[in-house]
Image (cartoon, rainbow, N blue to C red):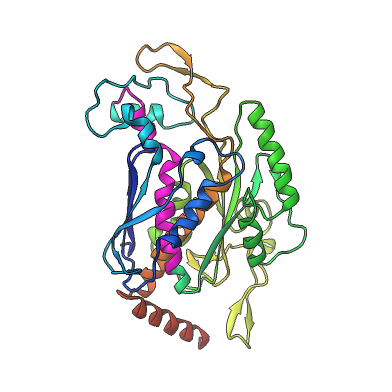
Amino acid sequence: MARLRWITAGESHGPRLTAVVEGVPSGLPLLASDVDGDLVRRQRGYGRGGRMKIETDRVEFVGGVRGGETLGSPIAMAIANRDHDNWLDRMSPAPMLAVPEPLTRPRPGHADLAGGLKHDRHDLRDILERASARETASRTAVGGVCRKLLGAAGIDVFAHVVAIGGVEASLAVELTSDAIRERSRASDLACADPDGEARMKDAIREAAHAGDTLGGVFEVVATGVMPGLGSHVQWDRKLDGRLAQALMSIQAMKGVEIGAGFGAARTRGSNVHDPIEYDREAKRFTRPTNRAGGLEGGITNGAPVVCRVAMKPIATLKRALASVDVVTKESYLAAFERSDVCAVAAASVVGEAMVCIVLADALLEKFGGDSMRELTRNVDGYREQLAGY
């Protein structure tokens, strides 16, 4: 059973987004600013649309935090939707004076039609409002709390964009994790390669002028992860599977690979598996390569955890694709809602959040602790145990 439980609620143009996370130990220093920084990064990125000019996401703790510290009780967070005021005639929770005009033309690539069929809704706004990637602001807030918890155990998580459309970043000089993190955080596209970033922006502009959209690939890296998180004993406890499911659950994600991923399938085992060495001075096992992405047998091995995620192009197109009205059954061009051209940089922040959530759950699963003092004592004791192995 997961030690960390969380859930989100709210619609894209509803009054607010809400998130509740349970299982965080008491005594964790936590301020709104610890979460707001990630929320701000989620809204940035070259190629974002008009919604980001309206919303200024800030979290409000409404439960579980007192005096800047967690209480050990469920942490409840709210993020106001400023744009809700412009949608009262269509998205008020109370009965509306006039029935809103229904949205009956599903957009290819969205949940509109599949959700409408599932829930028997002919106004597809009842589906798209929740299916919207606006929901990821709630996830990012939960991830921000988990990031703070991981930091207390010496674990850091960051992401960087490695491809937009057919343009790939190229890091000719081997950079440290700290350098990649610093460069990507300073980039409009969360890209650590300045030349690659410039070419990516050109590609985004070209797609925008054509009324089209672009996807891409981002990489999430977790450093400082001790060996032993996750388990080999059951399918649902394997950490690589948990990470893949969490990352694939982000809207518009279509593929996840860990370490060498699909590339490992195209070469021989001698060029894939990581040799094992021992650092006598540091008293720890090491590997000169990390093609396994920090996970072997569903368990962390002490190397950085590395996941790559493929995001499809955004499905809302100005150059609309053909669709069928769910009421009249007539063919039409799909409805267009305000949208981004490219949101891979923003998605990478959500990817960070999901990895933080999974790793925080795995950390609590292994070390337990109702208070931060208890948790950190358990972590310190385990690190001593590893040094004496």
The region drawn magenta spans 121-149
Q: Position of residue 208 (x, y in %)?
A: 63, 31
Q: Position of residue 67 (x, y in %)?
A: 32, 69
Q: In the rendered image, is residue 238 in sight? A: no
Residue depicted at 28% across the width and 26% down the height: 120
Residue depicted at 37% across the width and 71% down the height: 28
Q: Position of residue 319 (x, y in %)?
A: 58, 22
Residue depicted at 67% across the width and 72% down the height: 288
Residue depicted at 39% across the width and 13% down the height: 329
Look at the image and say whether residue 128 sits in the magenta stretch: yes
Q: Nearer the viewer, residue 184 or 307?
A: 184
* Residue 84 falls left or right of residue 46: left
Q: Nearer the viewer, residue 357 or 297?
A: 357
SS assignment for the magenta stretch, majority: helix
Look at the image and say whether residue 389 sits in the magenta stretch: no
Q: Residue furthest right?
A: 172
* Residue 306 falls left or right of residue 133: right
Q: Is residue 9 above or below residue 364?
A: above
Q: In the rendered image, is residue 22 in sight? A: yes
Q: Nearer the viewer, residue 215 or 50?
A: 50
* Residue 274 falls left or right of residue 379: right
Dividing the image into 4 quarters, which one contains the N terminus?
A: bottom left
Q: Is residue 37 above or below residue 318?
A: below
